């Protein structure tokens, strides 16, 4: 994966999202639409998160230093956790705002302006979402993958706004203007509910990584490889530990050799390491693999 390409795409995404945020906030104030204003503030928060992601990508590129000897991989799930938390909080705020808007008798808004806004940004945001998804097939960046969720959410928000404002325009043209005033707060409630799944989709994996919960898929893979190696090479026992921080995987394996194990030189142990490493998949900069050998079980207790 090209970290330079990742940084360039994150920077481009940040600048474009900031432009969307400003357009949404200005349009929301001018039209009097709380749902458009909400869309603008969501984009502004997304811009802030993208800045954090860009900083994280640059730190990861530096790999490690004396203070952070395993690199800066741990920052990736922390940034995603912040993003998911912001999404959840803003969804709760939007839901309550919509409920109070209905209770207070709805809102009059300038439909012509907001329909143009929603139509333009539906096209722009969906186009950019598919563009980023296409680019990330080569980059294979989890930061880009989760960052792109904000574009999908924003595009879905714009679609919802467009459909709802067109419905409000239809109601007004048919002489049901008293019902049209409830469209804006109703949109806000629907948008809030549609934001919950993306928020939890980001929060779940990020929280697991921050808490250091062992990833089941990686743990099962390591155990399958080592169970087979134990039978093939006659190991007495082994113990393995796995952890994941963002895209970084940490694998630690301690193997107990029998007392009568035939060992002629250290190169034989290195060959075993190479064999186990190959069976665990192609090594890359994000995989930290430690394999040690001992003849005493006390060292793996």
Image (cartoon, rainbow, N blue to C red):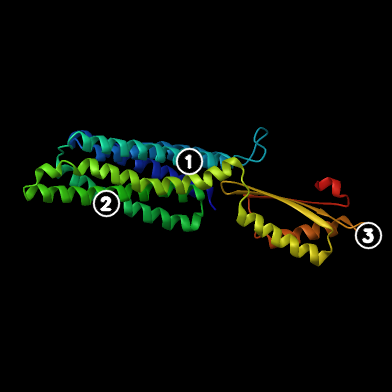
* Residue at numbered disc 3: 260
Residue 126 vs residue 144: left or right? left
Q: CA distance from mark 1 to mark 3?
A: 52 Å
Q: Residue furthest left?
A: 175
Which residue does the image show at 27% across and 42% down from the upper left? Answer: 188
Which residue does the image show at 50% across and 54% down from the upper left? Answer: 139
- Residue 26, quarter of the rendered image: top left
Chain-order first, disc 1 or disc 3: 1
Q: Position of residue 104 (x, y in %)?
A: 20, 33
Chain-order first, disc 2 or disc 3: 2
Which residue does the image show at 34% across and 39% down from the upper left? Answer: 42
SS for tag 2? helix
- Mark 2 near mark 3, Cβ–Cβ under 8 Å? no
* Front in this rendered view, residue 51 or 189: 189
Q: Which mark is residue 180?
A: none
Q: Residues within 10 Å of mark 3 (few under 14, many from 20)?
A: few
* Residue at numbered disc 1: 53
Which residue does the image show at 19% across and 35% down from the upper left? Answer: 32
SS for tag 1? helix
- Residue 185, quarter of the rendered image: top left
Q: Position of residue 290 (x, y in %)?
A: 74, 50
Residue 13 vs residue 187: left or right? right
Q: CA distance from mark 2 to mark 3?
A: 70 Å
Q: Which mark is residue 159?
A: 2
* Front in this rendered view, residue 168 or 72: 168
Residue 251 vs residue 47: left or right? right
């Amino acid at each position: 994966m090209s970290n330079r390409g990742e940084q360039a795409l994150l920077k481009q995404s940040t600048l474009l999202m900031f432009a969307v945020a400003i357009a949404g906030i200005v349009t929301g104030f001018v039209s009097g639409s709380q749902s458009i204003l909400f869309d603008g503030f969501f984009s502004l928060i997304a811009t802030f998160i993208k800045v954090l992601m860009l900083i994280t990508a640059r730190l990861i590129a530096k790999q490690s230093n004396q203070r952070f000897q395993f690199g800066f991989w741990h920052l990736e799930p922390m940034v995603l956790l912040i993003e998911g938390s912001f999404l959840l909080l803003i969804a709760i705020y939007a839901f309550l705002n919509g409920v109070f808007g209905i209770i207070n008798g709805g809102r009059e808004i300038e439909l012509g302006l907001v329909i143009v806004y929603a139509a333009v940004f539906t096209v722009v945001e969906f186009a950019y979402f598919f563009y980023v998804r296409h680019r990330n097939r080569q980059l294979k960046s989890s930061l880009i993958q989760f960052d792109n969720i904000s574009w999908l959410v924003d595009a879905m928000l714009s679609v919802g706004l467009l459909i709802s404002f067109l419905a409000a325009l239809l109601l007004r043209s048919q002489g049901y203007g008293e019902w049209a005033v409830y469209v804006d707060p109703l949109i806000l409630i629907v948008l809030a509910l549609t934001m919950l799944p993306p928020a939890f989709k980001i929060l779940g994996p990020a929280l697991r990584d921050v808490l250091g919960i062992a990833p089941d898929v990686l743990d099962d893979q390591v155990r399958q490889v080592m169970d087979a190696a134990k039978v093939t090479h006659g190991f007495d026992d082994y113990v393995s530990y796995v952890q994941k921080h963002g895209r970084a995987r940490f694998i630690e394996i301690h193997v107990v050799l029998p007392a009568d194990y035939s060992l002629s030189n250290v190169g034989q142990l290195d060959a075993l390491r190479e064999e186990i490493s190959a069976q665990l998949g192609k090594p890359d900069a994000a995989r930290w693999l430690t394999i040690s050998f001992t003849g005493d079980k006390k060292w793996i207790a």
